[in-house]
């Protein structure tokens, strides 16, 4: 296969009823029963399921599902497996960056298929974009909890709709309770490619061979279980790396379960709000920024096609090309 130029984009085959979806754990492990509801739901829609060995948790080592070699081999095995039409990661956690230099990106180029997940999967997705220019999907995992079942079901159903029908332009499906807005005075309209995911993972790739080019991109980002000062530090890291300077725009998701930093000088002091941090960090820039989207760790997990061309007209987003073929 000829080497991709920076303008050539790979798109995976769409899902059709009867296809096999492979589920792997390239990051942390889950209890074996954690994906049962999600698997049952996918099977009810007419899909077959193939579980990777890492999903069983038998080989779990601390905070990762299996050895680096085993996890890397399984990623490659599922990309090469002709029976598997889509790969869903079972969960995030930690560990995807440990296998990035163990993957064969030429093989992935030659076997483009759907890859969907969020959180730690961001590292794997952005590396594949950098090396292969393959559109992947920041979207839900098959882990569906009883306490959040209705939201998880909505997220997974809308993901399948995009993966099955997204051969032309479309509006991103949004939950009715979501109220996106413009961040401060950052209104406007722009068309560019979407890149991003979890903020910690984006920063973790800076300066590496897997650091995606964000110039002229619409950066989407979110974070969970971090303190306000840590989020400010991550954004400052992006700023110092000049990653914020040349964006076409940004889409900001939930910053959920924000912890107290304990960094205030006096006990009566409180941390700045996430809104205050975002407004301060983005104040030098004049590109459009949408705020309040539910993706990744949010209340809902919207599906965002990583690398797809999108029109951001604050605060709404439309995908303006097919993301599957």
Image (spheres, rainbow, N blue to C red):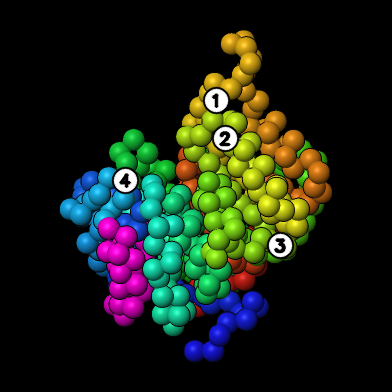
Q: Which one is in front in this view, the residue at disc 4 or the one at disc 3?
A: 4
Q: Does the magenta stretch include residue 74?
A: yes
Instruction: Tell me, yes or no, whether the two marked residues, 2 and 4, touch with CB atoms within 8 Å.
Output: no
Residue shown at 59% from the left, 30% from the top:
228
Residue at mark 4 to residue at mark 3: CA–CA distance: 34 Å
Say whether disc 1 or disc 3 marks the residue closer to the N-terminus.
Answer: 3
Which secondary structure lies at badge 4? loop
**Could you say which is closer to the camera, residue 117 or residue 29?**
29
The magenta stretch spans which residues? 67-89
Give left or right: position of 188 versus 47.
Answer: right
Residue at mark 2 to residue at mark 4: CA–CA distance: 21 Å
Residue at mark 1 to residue at mark 3: CA–CA distance: 32 Å
Quadrant in which residue 87 is drawn: bottom left
Say whether disc 2 or disc 1 marks the residue closer to the N-terminus.
Answer: 2
Say whether disc 4 or disc 1 marks the residue closer to the N-terminus.
Answer: 4
* Position above or below: 227 against 103: above
Instruction: Tell me, yes or no, whether the two marked residues, 2 and 1, touch with CB atoms within 8 Å.
Output: yes
Instruction: Say which residue label 2 marks.
Output: 230
Give left or right: position of 266 versus 114.
Answer: right
Instruction: Tell me, yes or no, whether the two marked residues, 1 and 3, touch with CB atoms within 8 Å.
Output: no
Instruction: Say which residue label 1 marks.
Output: 261
Residue at mark 2 to residue at mark 3: CA–CA distance: 24 Å
Which secondary structure lies at badge 2? helix
Say whether disc 2 or disc 4 marks the residue closer to the N-terminus.
Answer: 4
- Rendered location of residue 94, percent (x, y): 39, 49
């Amino acid at each position: 296969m000829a080497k991709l130029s920076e303008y050539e984009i790979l798109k995976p085959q769409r899902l059709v009823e009867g296809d096999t979806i492979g589920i792997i754990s390239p990051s942390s492990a889950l209890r074996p029963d954690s994906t049962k509801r999600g698997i049952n739901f996918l099977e009810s829609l007419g899909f077959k399921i193939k579980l990777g060995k890492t999903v069983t948790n038998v080989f779990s080592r601390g905070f990762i599902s299996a050895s680096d070699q085993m996890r890397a081999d399984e990623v490659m095995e599922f990309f090469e497996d002709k029976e598997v039409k889509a790969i869903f990661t079972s969960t995030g956690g930690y560990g995807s960056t440990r296998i990035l230099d163990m993957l064969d990106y030429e093989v992935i180029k030659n076997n483009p298929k759907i890859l969907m997940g969020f959180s730690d999967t961001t590292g794997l997705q952005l590396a594949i974009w950098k090396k292969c220019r393959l559109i992947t999907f920041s979207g839900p995992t098959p882990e569906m909890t009883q306490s959040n079942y209705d939201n998880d079901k909505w997220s997974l159903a809308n993901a399948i709709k995009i993966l099955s029908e997204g051969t032309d332009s479309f509006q991103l499906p949004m939950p009715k309770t979501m109220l996106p807005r413009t961040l401060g005075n950052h209104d406007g309209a722009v068309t560019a490619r979407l890149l991003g995911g979890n903020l910690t993972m984006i920063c973790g790739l800076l300066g590496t061979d897997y650091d995606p080019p964000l110039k002229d991109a619409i950066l989407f980002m979110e974070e969970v279980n971090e303190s306000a000062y840590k989020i400010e530090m991550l954004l400052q890291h992006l700023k110092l790396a000049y990653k914020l300077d040349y964006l076409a725009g940004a889409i900001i998701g939930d910053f959920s379960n924000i912890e107290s930093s304990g960094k205030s000088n006096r006990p009566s002091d409180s941390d700045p709000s996430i809104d205050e941090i975002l407004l301060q960090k983005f104040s030098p820039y004049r590109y459009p920024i949408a705020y309040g989207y539910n993706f990744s760790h949010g209340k809902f997990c919207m599906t965002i096609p990583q690398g797809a061309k999108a029109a951001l007209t604050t605060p709404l987003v439309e995908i303006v090309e097919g993301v599957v073929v």
